[in-house]
Image: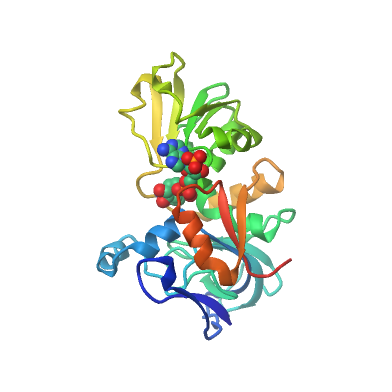
Amino acid sequence: MKAIVQLAQGSADGLRLQEVEKPTPKANEVLVQVHAATVTAGDVVMRKLPRLVYPVLALMGLKRKSIPGHEFAGVVEAVGDDVTRFRAGDHVFGTTTGLRVGANAEYVCVPETSKSGVIAEKPANISYEQAAALPVGGMTALQILRKANIQHGQRALIYGASGSVGSYAVQLAKYFGADVTGVCSAANFEMVQSLGADSVIDYASGDFTHNTQTYDVIFDAVGKTSQKKLKNVLAENGVYLSVKGSTSEKLEYLSFLGELAEKGQIKPYIDARYPLEQTPAAHRYVETGRKKGNVVITVVNS
Ligand SMILES: NC(=O)c1ccc[n+]([C@@H]2O[C@H](COP(=O)([O-])OP(=O)(O)OC[C@H]3O[C@@H](n4cnc5c(N)ncnc54)[C@H](OP(=O)(O)O)[C@@H]3O)[C@@H](O)[C@H]2O)c1
């Protein structure tokens, strides 16, 4: 099969399209024909980390991937003898977190259940590309926002609303009943409003922390600010959340997001699509830190 192989840590030049052996599922694994995958901000971080750091990351369940790509959507081609939830022909989506091989490839084998990654039935009425773009940003936003236990009518500020995590945070905060303000650049106002934000603030023009408006929930979804910087606009007893720090993946989160996507209550935002062989170009784009929502790798044109 064709796959993107990471030959060296460092620049995207170390990513090459190669012919590699198609994987065979073990007893607890599902073999998925990948229709779409993604390049996330995390993929770029993992590519650039020095090899020396990986033994430390292994303690957190993270492994260096010889084939990158944390998210996938596709069709089950075969299952191992012990697999009960899936069978050949099922449409699925999920993550390869904690595995040594990722989804920037024609096929990937993932365990039916694992400590770190998740796989679930794909929402029927969204595309493979949309489904591939949902797990990492969606589960991160959901897990962190739930900590605030948003009540109807509360005011939520999503800082970095145009990123992947931010784009899901805007939609989920709306779903939970908040009045949502998105902080992004003026160029991304339209995008963030299209996701449902009630108001938008340009982080580059003026200092909005001197405004009198305060927020019950503030979520730094891009990791570029701090509670100290935003303390003036955090309401008394308000909750401050940040994407900095570790999160985990759970089947319950992915299933919940899948249901919302199926009902049209959240929509994965796709900025750009690249064919598998152009994965290095996708990495270079994500590395700029300017992507909007998600960047997809289209493996099969559906
Ligand atoms: N904890 C976890 O489990 C977890 C999971 C996923 C991601 N992350 C981390 O979360 C961060 C966000 O990832 P992501 O994929 O959502 O987004 P991203 O690709 O890192 O961010 C891109 C977006 O951020 C906006 N942006 C850049 N600088 C900004 C600033 N100073 N203020 C406000 N917006 C700014 C950009 O818009 P402009 O070009 O208009 O500025 C762009 O739309 C990354 O550091 C990632 O590693 C953590």
Q: Residue at x 36, y 44 (%)?
A: 244
Q: Quadrant of ligand 1?
A: top left
| Extreme residue toward the top, this view | 212
Q: Quadrant of the C terminus?
A: bottom right
Q: Judge whether 274 appears above or below 203 on screen.
A: below
Q: How many marks?
A: 0
Q: Nearer the viewer, residue 167 or 172?
A: 167
Q: Position of residue 299 (x, y in %)?
A: 63, 69
Q: Position of residue 124 (x, y in %)?
A: 73, 56
Position of 35 compared to 150: left or right? right
Q: Judge whether 192 appears above or below 272 on screen.
A: above
Q: Residue at x 53, y 80 (%)?
A: 27
Q: Position of residue 78 (x, y in %)?
A: 63, 78
The image quarter containing residue 153 is top right
Q: Position of residue 185 (x, y in %)?
A: 51, 34
Q: How is the image coloured?
A: rainbow
Q: Is residue 36 visible?
A: yes
Q: Judge whether 89 appears above or below 118 on screen.
A: below
Q: Residue at x 36, y 26 (%)?
A: 230
Q: Nearer the viewer, residue 158 or 29?
A: 158
Position of 279 compared to 273: left or right? left
Q: Residue at x 62, y 59 (%)?
A: 273
Q: Nearer the viewer, residue 231 or 25?
A: 231
Position of 270 compared to 237: left or right? right
Q: Is residue 221 visible?
A: no
Q: Quadrant of the N terminus?
A: bottom right
The image quarter containing residue 112 is bottom right
